[in-house]
Each structure stands twice: as structure tokens, then as C-alpha cells.
Image (cartoon, coloured by chain):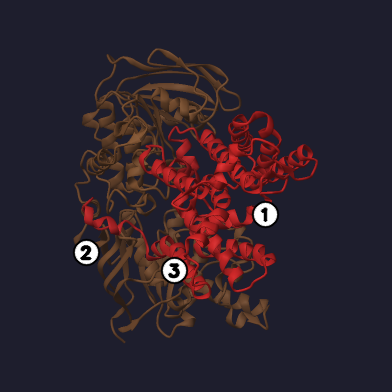
Chain colours: A brown, B red
Amino acid sequence: MTDTVLEVRNLRKEFRGVVALDDISFELRRHEVVGLIGENGAGKSTLLKVLSGIYKPDGGEILREGKKVTFRTAAESAAAGIGMVHQEQSLVTSISVAENIFLGVEGAGVSAGVYRWGTLRTLAQEQLDKIGSPISPKTKVEHLSFAERQMVELAKALSVEERADSEPVIVLDEPTSVLEGDELEVLFDQIDRLRKFASIVFVSHRLDEVLRVSDRVYVFKDGQCVAVRDRSEVDVDELHRLMVGRESTAEFYHEAKQTAVVDQPVLMQVTGLGKTKAFEDVNFTLRAGEVVGITGVLGSGREELSRVLFGAEGFDQGSITLGGKSIGLRSPVEAVRAGIGYIPAERRIEGIAQGLSVQENIFLADPSTVSAGPFLKPRAAAAAADEWIRKLKIKTPNRGTNISNLSGGNQQKAVLAKWLTSPRLKVLILDHPTRGLDVGAKEDVYGFIRELCARGIGVILLADTLEETIALSHTILVMRDGRVQQTFDAHPGNKPRPVDLVEGMV
Amino acid sequence: MAILTPTRPRQAAASGVTVKDRIIAVFPLLVLIVLVLLVLTQQPNFLSLASVRGLLESMAPILLLAIGQTFVILTGGIDLSFAVVSSLSTVLLALWLPDMGVGALILVPILACLTGVLTGTVVAFAQIPSFIVSLGAMGLWTGVALTLSSASTIRISANYDVIGWVTDMRIAGLPVSALLAILLAILISVAIRVLNRGRALHTMGLAENALLMSGNPTRAYRILAFALCGLFSGLAGVVLASSQYSGGPSLGDTLMLPAIAAVVIGGNAITGGVGGPLKTLVGALIIVVLRVGLNAIGIDPAYEQIIYGAVIIGAVVLTIDRSRLGIVK
């Protein structure tokens, strides 16, 4: 018995010219919990997919109990005793716990193509007993809570033990993202129990949790392993700094760059705006360089409001003026012509044009700056695209790369560039601009919002979190049931607290 | 992702184009060359002027129809009424040429274009799949053509010379109809390259929602695609009427399969977004060489439609990008 149960040496993986894993080496020792952290796109998920046989590596090797192995399918990885608990829950909700645990690997649970229910349930019970779970194997998964489903996933992953001749390796991919409070404690108890007979890789973006359960932590950044730390010699701040590559105390929201706008001219005036069954009597003004944040829970009408302001949906009451002129806003075409831009929450469908290059995406809304009449000026377009890629720090092999191959943050930056390149732009509507982005990309986006304001562009913001809304906005509208309940002044030095906003939301 | 230094010209090759993409890009051309070589073994005089002339003459209406269809397929749709519209155009020409002369030559393609506008408008505003709308239009225009022609072939009784030059005129011994169709294909692909909205129809096929949310008039683009398809069907009707000295309510109907086959075998993605008229040109050449080749090895022309059907399905199977599809219905 060696002391290293799983080792990865010089692993490399590329996707269409984009390096996802660059010379990764990684070691898991017997009965150890190893934490794996990194921003989105750092390569964590890719490594896990290589380990579970979903991706084939382009270089390097994997050693299991000291022996070189290759996994061509997920089944081969499982047969080597590697059990995965996936980030997206992979259970079939309409069938029982027992069926899920042995889905596709029923073994003695099936004879002649027919379920032997008694055997299947007994086998499932054995797996559930390993983690001391009180869940009955007969229960349908759809009746279980998220936390309970996570336990079933864990039991499913543990079932690799019987199929392999070595102790299991359990990989937990972001297991805590759907769990809260007591549920978390249950999971941590289970991990403590597991480490007596298994070795565990724990992937999470919650650094405090990683530190709590892990013996050692690997920090991934840009497809490389940038640090390995023992729990005793590191704290959350240092991990964050290693992961993001900058001080965590840095001005995340660039608040120092927020400027007062009370003297600025009014860009947009919304008066008595209403849409049947969505919202009514919405009034606000947007000044040059101002950020108006709109908060509210689902169904508060703020999503519809943002789409109406871009002409994607119609309105039936009130008026909108832009630069003193009333605008009808019957379609996005009219909105863009009037100088309104929109960064949609559905980035992959409405934001980027998948299949087009980064350059084509940048000039999708307004190619006028790189055109002579209806003709494209190819050299000017190429130069301008390169300039935007450099300015917004878009990580792409080149301007001709298919935008689908970029990470979410870089795609979002290209969407931003699409509007920034338009000289007509007066108002930009940001619908969850940082959704699904990693910390570094978020900070970049906040920086760009400040720069937009400095250029005199008005911003309407529907943010992901209250903190984001408060930090970025000059004015905050709190919506509930289709009406603006409260309006907060949030100028620099006069920020409301999250709890103040919540009162108006619920 | 590792730190990537952006934009050195030499890196252009690494822009995420896979080997498969490359093979698909040159595959139709290889097929064409192999086909020509195969036919040459059977007919050593296949590349003689007379033979090439005949080949191009039969290609002209197919190519025009196929170019028209390319616009619609680029947007991710299909226009099944296009061949029928070319038949209707021959009927209108035969009816109107004797009285109107050049006026008919101008009016008929415009009307054909309007049939496309109609189909496109219904597709864009009623948001019904183009397959269904154009299937209905196919029935509609067949009925109109049958009614106007009393279900019979109409000989062009006067003013034939207004369209006769399309068949008779030769440049360097080659038929002007095919040369003009090829010229149109080249002009369109140049326009796609140099216009700043040149790839609008491609983008419709790839990411219509993103195009709309960038403030582009997507409905107008869709109608434009069908209008161009209608216009090219009308032009195909002119070539057909000219070569047959007549108009007939089903004169162009049999060209439906070869024209669609030309589009897909040329490498235009049936799911939209990828392709262009030059690919269609290669596809049309493959189709006509295939036809001659089948003839040369003694296959009954009655089997041609079977081959076209198989070619369409085979080409789509080979080229379709399944990663972009959800559940296929």
C-alpha cells in the first residue's frame, strides 16, 4: 500500500486552442481531505472531468495507488474506485433512491433484465448506512430536500467502493452551494466520517468551508496550480489573494471612483410608466453618469421594467423621454437607434452571438465606427477589435476566435464592448451583468461601469445582490408587486444598508 | 485559462477551427473533383467545350434556385415553395410576353420576389415555422399556376427573343445563363464580405436572439431572405421558360430536390449560420456532374430523384453540428 491514493502528473487539456489545464500536478494521500479552489475558468471542473473519464487529457498521466491508469469512460473511472458527487445534481427525480444509487450498475440488483427489488434495496441500504443516513431506499427522489439529495449523491458515489479493489476516492464538486446552516453541518459530519475509510477531494468556492474540512488546499488559477498550502499555514484572506491574484481588501466595487451626479443633465425621464399585469406608475430620472439600481424579488416587476426600457416588451401607460424627446420604444431596434443598450441576463442566448467571432460580436450592435457607408473597413475593424480586447482585458487567442470558446467573464466583456463601441450610446441597461462570473471578472465589470459613468453614460442596473446594488448605484428604486415602494439616495457617503432595502422588498 | 497574448496574426490558425471543420470546408470540392475524374474515366471527352456547355446549361436554373434557397437556409429556415414559384413564373412569362414584351421580363421576377415577401412576412410576424408556411405557399402557387395555365403548357407565341438570348447567347462558347448565375453567386459572396451587415443572415441562423437584442431588425432580415429566394426563383423561371420556349405549371417542380441537394452538399449547414453562395455553386456543380455521371454509367434517369433524396440526407448526416441541436423532432 502506497501512501498516495491518487496522483496526477503534468496534466494538460486544451479546448480549441484555449488552454484549460496547463501542466497540473496534484496528489491525494490516504484518508486525506484535499480542498481545491479557484475562480470560474481556473480549471477545477476540467480536472474533475478528466478524473471522472469525461474528458481525455492532451498530456500527462494519472496514477491510482501508484499504477498508471487511463479512463476512457465514466464507468472506467468508477471501476477504479473514484466516486463523483456532481455540482449539478445528477439524480433522476422520478425514481427511487435505491434505483438512483445503482443506476446503470445494478449488478446483483437486476437479474434477467428485471429488478430484484429486495436485493437492490438491501444494497442501497448498505450504501446509505455508510454515511449513517436515515433516508429510506424506497423513497422517490422528488420527495427529498436538496440536502437529502446531496446525501443520496454521496451514497451513490460511495458505491464505487464495492466495485473497486481499493479504498474509494470521493470527489465533491461544489457540494455546499445548495446547502445551508444545519444541512452544511450534516455534510461536514459525513466528510469526517468518510475520511476514516476514504480519501476526499473537496471543491468549493466558499473558502472558509474549504479551510474547515481540508488538510491541504490546492489553489488553481488560469489553468495552473499556483499554490499548495497546509491548513495550519494559511487563512481565508491569503487563499483569496492566491486565487484572485490581488489583495482581497482592494476596492472591489471601485467605490472611490463613484462621483456625484446631482448637477448633471437629465438623460432619461420615465413618467407614470405601466404595463398591465407587470408594473404600474413607475417614475424616475436618470442623469448623465448616474447609476439607478432597481431591486426587488422575483415578481416585483423589475425584470419586465428593464425589458420595456429596451423595447423588448411594450408598455401601455406613461411615457419615456430620452434627451428631452419622447420615445415610443416599440422594439429593440428603436431603443438602439435612440441610444439605449442592453446587457441581458441570458448571456449565452441574448448576449453573445454564438458561432460568430469575438470581433463580429463587438460590432454586432453598431458597426458605424468601422464602416464607410454600408461597407466594412476591415483593417479599421481589426484594429478596433484588438483595441477593445486589450482595453477590456478579454482573454482570447485572437479576435477571430469563436466567442463560444471563451469563458463566461470574457464573453460578458465582449458584450460590454459591443455597446461601448457605439458612439450613440446614452443609456445602458445592465440586467444581472455579473451573473455567473468569477470574482476577478466581476471586479473588472464594476470598473467598467465606473468608466461608463465617467463618460456620461446613464446606467440602469438590476444587480445580483443587494451589496452590488448599493455599492454601484447613486439612486435605488425598491420594487414590490409592480410598484416602486421606496426610493433611496445612495450617493457616495450616503449608502443605505441592505436591511433598509429589504424592508421595502417584502 | 492560461494567459494568452492576444492577436498575433500568425496565431489566426488557432482560432478554434477544428480539423473536422476544415475537412467539412473542403469536402464538397474534393467530392466534385473525384466525381469529375470518375466521369472522365467513362467519358474521356467529358471536359470538351460541347459537353461543358450542356452541363452548364442544365445547371443554370438549379444554381439560381439553389442560391435563392441558400439565403433562407442560412437563416435556419427553408422555403419549400421556391421551385413552384419558378414554375408559376414560366406560366406568367408565357402569358404576358406576347403583349408586354420586356415589361413581363421585369414584372415576373418582381412578382416572384413578392411571393417570398409574403411567405417571409407570415413566418416573421405569425412566428410559424417556415417549413409549414412555405408548404402552404407551395400548394397555393401550384394552384394559381394551374388555374392561369388551364393546366397545360403554354407556348410563347410572340416576343420570345426578349428572353431567348438567355439560352442562345454564348460567351467564349459558354451559355450566358450559367455565366450570369455564377456571376451573381460571386457578387453576393463579395457583398457578404464587404458589407458591414453582410453576415446578418448568417447571424440570424446562429444567434437570432442576440442579433435582436443588439438592436437589429431581425424580422426584416427574415423577410429579406425569403424575398431574395423568391426573386431568384423568378430568375430561374426566366431561364426555364427561355430554354423550353414555353411556360408550364410544373416546369420547375422537379428541380426542388436537386436545388436543395445542391445547397446542402455544397456545405451550407441545414441548421443555418454557415455557408454562402460559393458553397452552393460547388454543390450545384456536383449535382449536375452527378447527373451526367449517372447517365454515363447507364443508370435510368428515373432513379435521379432517389439519388438526390439520398444526397440530401447523406450530406446533412455528414455535416450537421449535433452539439448545437437539442432534441430533434
Tell me, for residue A229, which label it has, or none: 2
Compared to residue B198, the image places residue A230 above or below, namely below
Query: At x 66% / y 45%, what residue is drawn?
Result: B245
Return the residue found at the far right: B150
Q: Amino acid at mark 1?
A: Thr
Q: Amino acid at mark 3?
A: Met
Q: Chain of mark 1?
A: B
Tell me, for residue B254, which label it has, or none: 1
Q: Secondary structure at mark 1?
A: helix
x, y (%) of residue B323?
A: 49, 59
Q: For the N terminus of chain A, which image quadrant?
A: bottom left
Q: Chain of mark 3?
A: A
Q: CA distance from mark 3 to mark 2?
A: 24 Å
Which is more foreground, mark 3 or mark 1?
1
Tell me, for residue B283, which label it has, or none: none
Residue B320 visible: no
Mark 3 or mark 2, earlier in chain = 3
